[in-house]
Amino acid sequence: MREAGPRTDAIHPTAVVDPGARLGEGVRIGAFTLVGADVEIGAGTVIGPHCSVHGPTRIGRDNHIHGHAAIGGEPQDKKFRGERVELVIGDRNTIREFVTINRGTGDGGGITRIGDDNWLLAYTHVAHDCIVGNHCVFSNNATLAGHVEVGDHVILSGFVGIHQFCRIGAHAFIGMGAFVNGDVPPFVMVAQDGYGRPRGINAEGLKRRGFDSARTAAIKRAYRALYVSGDSLAEARACIAELARDSDDVRAFLDFIDSGERPLLR
């Protein structure tokens, strides 16, 4: 990262870049885009036309932010009083048109964080204090309320809405139009039914990521214990704890169940 920024011919003459912004080598900025003070943009990142990037925001390397995205805006929270809060975005993310990502809040940890290699498609919204992992796909109009945590390799289909403070475990799949108001364990697939309801595990996604039949079968047994057996949560948990002795994936499933503050989506 260097103070002087990229070549001037990589910044469109109509773009406005605050002198306090720090731009890495090869950064390109499109027409009518605003880059504010206290913004860092890593090498090779491309920002399209008509975007706004407000600080404090740190964006990593080789991201592509398409036109009309609004990055690093103030949190949409009435308790926000102008305290210093941040947005941190990792490397190699694709952020499509009209995506909005807000900074954190002082009461919520102060940071909104996006990992690496994610695809955030048009009109996605990531609210204050959210934590998004790596290799996720958020389809058009997917929305995270404040304080949501999303694990790695999660897919949110179009028009999905996630309630504030919910957690979505790694490798979960949320079907189109589902509204999620509880924690979704790792590997679980949720489909729309008013509010979203679990509908099996994300078997196809696990297959694509190299999970063999033995791993998938163990995850299915844990899912059935929690969602199909009819047992109480305590009884299901005891069964899953037995299964976790022979499966790291089931152990991750159990750890997720045990660590949440909101009710599980059941």
Image (cartoon, rainbow, N blue to C red):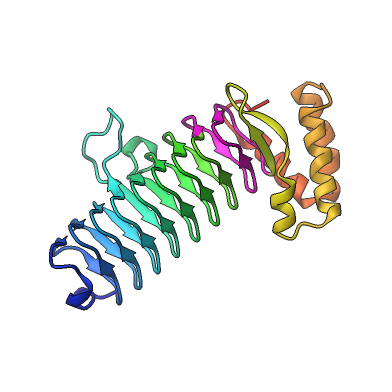
Q: Quadrant of residue 179?
A: top right
Q: Describe residue 203's horizontal placement relative to residue 56 as left or right.
A: right
Q: Which residue is at the front of the view, 123 or 185?
A: 123
Task: Give the image location of residue 88, x and y in percent.
Answer: 37, 55
Task: Give the image location of residue 250, x and y in percent.
Answer: 77, 45
Q: Which residue is at the front of the view, 46 or 86?
A: 46
Q: Residue at x 86, y 50 (%)?
A: 246
Q: Describe residue 249's horizontal placement relative to residue 172 as left or right.
A: right
Q: Describe residue 33's horizontal placement relative to residue 237 as left or right.
A: left
Q: Residue at x 58, y 23 (%)?
A: 195
Q: Which residues are magenta?
A: 161-186
Q: Where 144 sits versus 249, above or below?
A: above
Q: Describe residue 159's horizontal placement relative to residue 22 as left or right.
A: right
Q: How many marks?
A: 0
Name the chief secondary structure element in magenta: loop
Q: Where 14 sits versus 98, above or below?
A: below
Q: Is residue 6 rendered magenta in the image? A: no
The quarter in which the C terminus is drawn is top right
Q: Which residue is at the front of the view, 138 or 219?
A: 138
The quarter in which the N terminus is drawn is bottom left
Q: Residue at x 24, y 41 (%)?
A: 83
Q: Residue at x 43, y 34 (%)?
A: 145
Q: Where 173 sits versus 178, above or below?
A: below
Task: Give the image location of residue 117, x and y in percent.
Answer: 50, 61
Task: Give the image location of residue 49, x and y in percent.
Answer: 25, 58
